[in-house]
Amino acid sequence: MKKFFFFLALLWLTQDCFCWGFYAHRKINNYAIFLLPPEMMVLYKPFADFITDHAVDPDKRRYILLQEGPRHFIDIDHYGKYPYRQLPHKWKDAIAKFSEDSLKTYGIGPWWVPIMLQRLTKAFKEKDQAKILKLSAETGHYIADLHVPLHASSNHNGQLSDQKGIHGFWESRIPELLADTEWDFFIGKAEYLKDPADFIWHRVLESGAAADTVLHYEKELSRAFPTDQKFSFEDRNGIIIRQYSSAYSKKYNEKLKGMIERRMRQSIFAVASFWYTAWINAGQPDLTRLANKDFGTDDQKEFEDLNTAWRNSPSTEREHE
């Protein structure tokens, strides 16, 4: 009996450790491909599986590189209240005011996305197919993360309000339950972003403003919902796990009035638009005539190391990084 309860506890602990959710990150990158113009689709569509599968590489990298974690979030409430005017949006100004170490402590997500955009633009200019694909997949991850309200909150997993687990609930459990059956991902085409940094900061401010709603509505629902119906045991890839019940998940989604679907749609549009902007800024190179089409030994080793690190990873306290 003790072994049984230990096994259940272990499953509950490990299922807590999700990002947007591997499922959602992959969906976002995949759907973003189909918002691109034909001149880009000639490269992105044949490599859709790669761009989809490697959408989660940055999360796997957290177990190899210490500096990776802060790139996925920003505890923007640390800098006051919405619209957080005391926090400079320019990196140099922010360093001058708060120091680089302090900024990294509370997350550098909105400053990291423009860096990824620059790298992707450079890869397009160099017509380096392997880098374009790798950077496209990873850029999509960071952009999507910043659309999650709890990636912009110091109470990132409800640990300050007795709501531990809400992070994976919002960004993993509910999308996995509803995205394929109830949500609509028919979205317009990618658009050129005249000011990508301003664009991503706007999305971060939206996330920061929504964090309280995410927490408040779950707390409110938890008080009203029958305690014995809040969780259920369900099959996940052949393993029985304890997770938020379907009924509780759907009721929470209703209270949020489509927030999760909306943020996922906005993520898809943003990812495609950043890819498109990088290609435009690079001079719209012909993507049927690229060099370095094969991933080298170093690339293959990196992919293997990432997978090994993820498989062997311990649970972490910071589920949203």
Image (cartoon, rainbow, N blue to C red):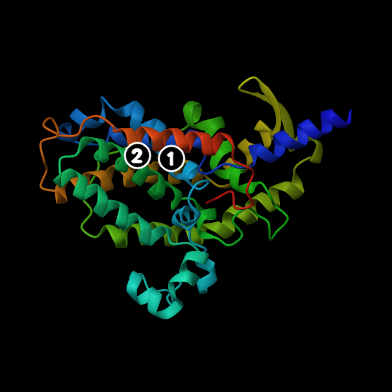
Q: Quadrant of residue 264?
A: top left
Q: Tell me: residue 226, above or below residue 74.
A: above
Secondary structure of the residue carrying numbered label 2: helix
Label 1 Cα crowd, 10 Å radius (few <14 / some 14-19 / many 20+)? some
Q: Which residue is mark 1?
A: 57
Q: Tell me: residue 314, above or below residue 295.
A: below
Q: Nearer the viewer, mark 2 or mark 1?
A: 1
Which residue is located at x 21 percent, y 45 percent?
123
Q: Which mark is residue 307?
A: none
Kindly give the residue lying farthest to the right in the view shown.
Answer: 1
Q: Quadrant of residue 2?
A: top right
Label 2 Cα crowd, 10 Å radius (few <14 / some 14-19 / many 20+)? many
Looking at the picture, tell me which residue is in the foreground, 295 or 256.
Answer: 295
Is 88 on the left or on the right of 120, as rendered?
right
Q: The N terminus lies in which quarter of the figure? A: top right
Kindly give the residue lying farthest to the front in the view shown.
Answer: 297
Kindly give the residue lying farthest to the bottom in the view shown.
Answer: 97
Residue 172: give x, y in percent of width and height: 55, 38
Residue 141: give x, y in percent of width and height: 40, 44
Q: Quadrant of residue 51?
A: top left
Q: Earlier in the sequence, mark 2 or mark 1?
A: 1
Evaluate whether residue 20 shows in this view: yes
Residue 215: give x, y in percent of width and height: 62, 55
Is 64 on the left or on the right of 29, as rendered?
right
Q: Tell me: residue 179, above or below residue 272.
A: above
Which residue is located at x 64 percent, y 56 percent?
216
Mark 1 and mark 2 in contact (Cβ < 8 Å)? yes
Under mark 2, the amino acid is Ala
Q: Which residue is mark 2?
A: 137
Which residue is located at x 34 percent, y 55 percent?
113
